[in-house]
Amino acid sequence: MAQNSIVKPIQLIVIGGSAGSLDVILKLMPALAPSLPVAILIVTHRKASSEDLLVDLLNSRGSWPVREAEEKEPVAPHAIYVAPSDYHLLIEKDFTFSLDVSEKVNYSRPSIDITFESAAEVYGEGLVAILLSGANADGVAGMKRVRSNGGTCVVQDPSTAEVSYMPAQAIEQGLAHHILPAEEMAAFINGLFTNDKNQ
Amino acid sequence: MEFEIQDDEIELLLQDLQERYGYDFTDYSKASLKRRINRLYSLDKFPSFALFRKQIQTDSIYFRRFVEEITVNVTEMFRDPSFYRILREEVLPVLATHPFIRIWHAGCSTGEEVYSMAILLREAGLLKKSLLYATDINPGVLERLKKGIFPLRFIKQYSENYIQSGGKDDFSRYYTAKYDWAKFDEQLTAKMVVATHNLVSDRSFNEFQLIFCRNVLIYFDRNLQNRALQLFDDSLDTLGFLALGAKENLKYSTIFRKYKQLENKERIWRKIA
């Protein structure tokens, strides 16, 4: 389509999810191609606790290194980062993480909206935002910004979501470039980095 | 939320704050700052950036609101109960050996953490010989701290945190509930020394055995983090303790070598040199 412009490579994938999203993420892990040149950031709603087992759980599921995003840490490719519970996660212009304990947004901290918005500002077209199963509208406003900044929006097919409200909201607002069932998420991500993707 | 105010406009505001009021936010983490400024701009329904800027420049009362809103003032009592458990079990016994205990809560906001610490000291029988210095950049939050009145709707959570932190008493003995508010025991407030202090520009003002600065450094860039940590180092006795937020770390700082983290996962370091 845009024949004269150089397509900016995808640099960051942010996956946002709430109730019912953990299962989708756990299935995604082992199906990811082993070394994609991209960073993946996972933002999920869960109970605030210092005993957070999500990182360990994800590490047991695939070959990608998974770790909690640390404040001021540079975003590196071929790594999966998890937003710590009870903090909002933002990304700075110099591609480092920032944490913030300000008020909850959509009753949530981390808020998917905040991370989507902040990543959209920094990565523009180089961002893919994926919104999974969930029971509130967090992520929808953020997706709007991802879209207006040129990023790609992927939404889980609500009929395959344990809780359909969150993805259904994003679709209703016309934000989804792609609507995918849970089991096709990994293939979609892998496909972003194969050479024949330009149809 | 659409970001109406862009980076170059934020630079202008930061310059104004510095020139007009002597407040320097230029080394704050930009992503959070930008979001907070845009949030306030839309909350207060300004029709244009020019009017927003003018209001901050010319109205010192609005300037106070601006600073209070762009800095994050979210805090709670006994936040991270396991952290308070370690304070109880490992730090208080050391403090107890001093004839007089001085503690600094830097960037304490409305003071929930200061009250939590005062309760720990009281339960250890140490409150009488202690002073808790509570400082923040915002005078408004410190006024609330001095009143010791907190919304009753949060008390259930605080009380659960208190029990998880190893609290053995009935939490309700520390406050009197009236309407929607809980007023904390004035004997706790009486041990607090309250003053404004700006970690960016103000200096060390005393020596302490324990300094808290939790969830403040995350808003600073690395350079400003190091300056603030140097200030704490200058203000801490040898063998004193430095307590940071759950996701903050001394690991990357210039003072790292002088400190040793306690033998647990909590973010408490001891000054060893």
Image (tube, coloured by chain):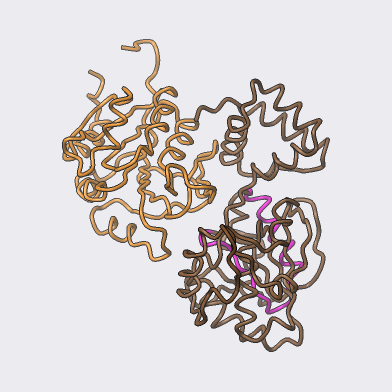
Chain colours: A orange, B brown
Q: Nearer the viewer, residue B44 or A116?
A: B44
Q: Would you place residue A158 above or below residue A43 in this image?
A: above
For the C terminus of chain A, which image quadrant? top left
Q: Residue at x 37, y 28 (%)?
A: A9
Q: Nearer the viewer, residue A53 or B109?
A: B109
Q: Nearer the viewer, residue A76 or B117?
A: B117
Residue B85 image position (x, y, % from top left): 51, 77
Relative horizontal placement of residue A92, taking residue A157 as reference (left or right): right
Q: Which residues are magenta?
A: B220-247
**Number of labelled discs?**
0
Q: Residue at x 73, y 50 (%)?
A: B140
Q: Quadrant of residue A180?
A: top left
Residue B172 image position (x, y, % from top left): 54, 73
Relative horizontal placement of residue B4, taking residue A109 as reference (left or right): right
Q: Residue at x 80, y 55 (%)?
A: B202
Q: Nearer the viewer, residue B126 or B101?
A: B126
Residue B181 image position (x, y, % from top left): 59, 60
Q: Quadrant of residue B269?
A: bottom right
Relative horizontal placement of residue B76, taking residue A105 as reference (left or right): right
Specify whether residue B240 is painted magenta.
Answer: yes
Residue B250 image position (x, y, % from top left): 59, 63
Q: Would you place residue B136 above or below residue B6 in this image?
A: below
Specify whether residue B165 is painted magenta.
Answer: no
